[in-house]
Amino acid sequence: MPPVYQRRERLKSMGIETWVPRISVPHGPEARAGEGETENICAHPLILDWDDLEQEVLGCTRCALHETRTQAVFGVGNRTAQWLFIGEAPGEQEDLQGEPFVGRAGQLLNEMIKAIGLSREEVYIANVLKCRPPKNRDPLPQEAAACESHLLSQLALIKPSIIVAVGRIAAQNLLKTGTPIGKLRGVVHDYQSIPLVVTYHPAYLLRSQTEKRRAWEDLKLARRTLNGRH
Ligand code: URA
């Protein structure tokens, strides 16, 4: 049985339902719009040395975003973290400062991390895209595909025990689905054989304070999954 399904069986025996995508190509309306332009990730082998990977990302020209970025935003935190938080893409402040989640949304993400008893330094924080899309537009499928091996390399190096997909765009890109975030939450997914929980983006929570309670439920689900409880 493939590891993905072994893990699903294990989690199922703990009463945690998981959802495993059966296909691993982008789909949904946005992906269809970019069909034919999506880069084959097999063209980019994983880089399993932190310095080499960082140099590769900082000098990356695989997609047009390198023309408009101030700098690529590699990722930050504990390189042996159990928790990996993955957002969508750098925004204005992140592009300027070279670090993910440093704006107002970043401060709230720090609070969310604190709520589970950890500090920003103890977890690892990365994004699906390493470069800022102009005017913070959503990532294009071909940009996400071009950047995917960078994230997969980080994943292979960190070997986290739990992934939190921060926001709809991150979740949909990671899980390669167009399913609404409301349906993706509350379930343990599988990403590269690692359990993944979806939560709301802190920028959304800043606008919609009443959803904070749900985000807390998501983090508790992630913590229970990590601890093998439910
Ligand atoms: N939003 C994200 O998804 N990532 C960042 O780094 C900043 C804001």
Image: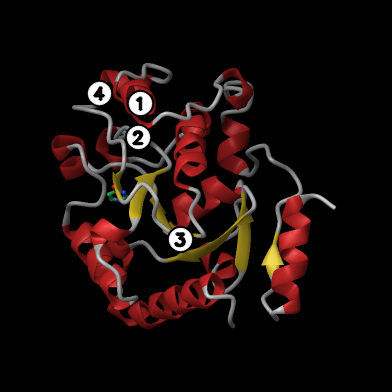
**Label 1 sits on residue:** 57
Using the image, determine if residue 44 lies above or below residue 1: above
Mark nearer the N terminus (4 vs 3): 4
Q: Residue at x 37, y 19 (%)?
A: 64
Circle nearer the N terminus (2, 1): 1
Give the SS element for disc 2: loop
* Residue topped by disc 4: 68
Mark 2 or 4: in front is: 2
Residue 174 in the figure: left or right of residue 27: left
Of labels 4 and 3, the one closer to you: 3
Number of numbered tags placed on the structure image: 4
Mark 1 secondary-structure assignment: helix
Image quadrant containing the C terminus: bottom right
Q: Callout 3: helix, strand or loop?
A: strand
2 or 1: mark nearer the eye: 1
Callout 4: SS = loop
Q: Is there CB contact under 8 Å for labels 2 and 3?
A: no
Q: Which mark is residue 130?
A: 2
Specify whether tag 3 is near ligand 1 (CB below 8 Å): no
Return the x and y of residue 112 as percentages of the image width and height: 30, 71
The front one of 154 and 215 is 154
The kind of residue tagged 1 is Val
Q: Are marks 2 and 1 in contact (CB under 8 Å)?
A: yes
- Mark-to-mark CA distance, 2 and 3: 17 Å
> What residue does disc 3 label?
164
> Alpha-carbon neighbours of circle 3 within 10 Å: few (<14), some, or many (≥20)?
many
User: What residue lies at 48% left-to-right and 26% top-to-bottom?
Assistant: 47
Outermost right residue: 1
Which of the two discs, 4 and 1, labels the residue nearer the N terminus? 1
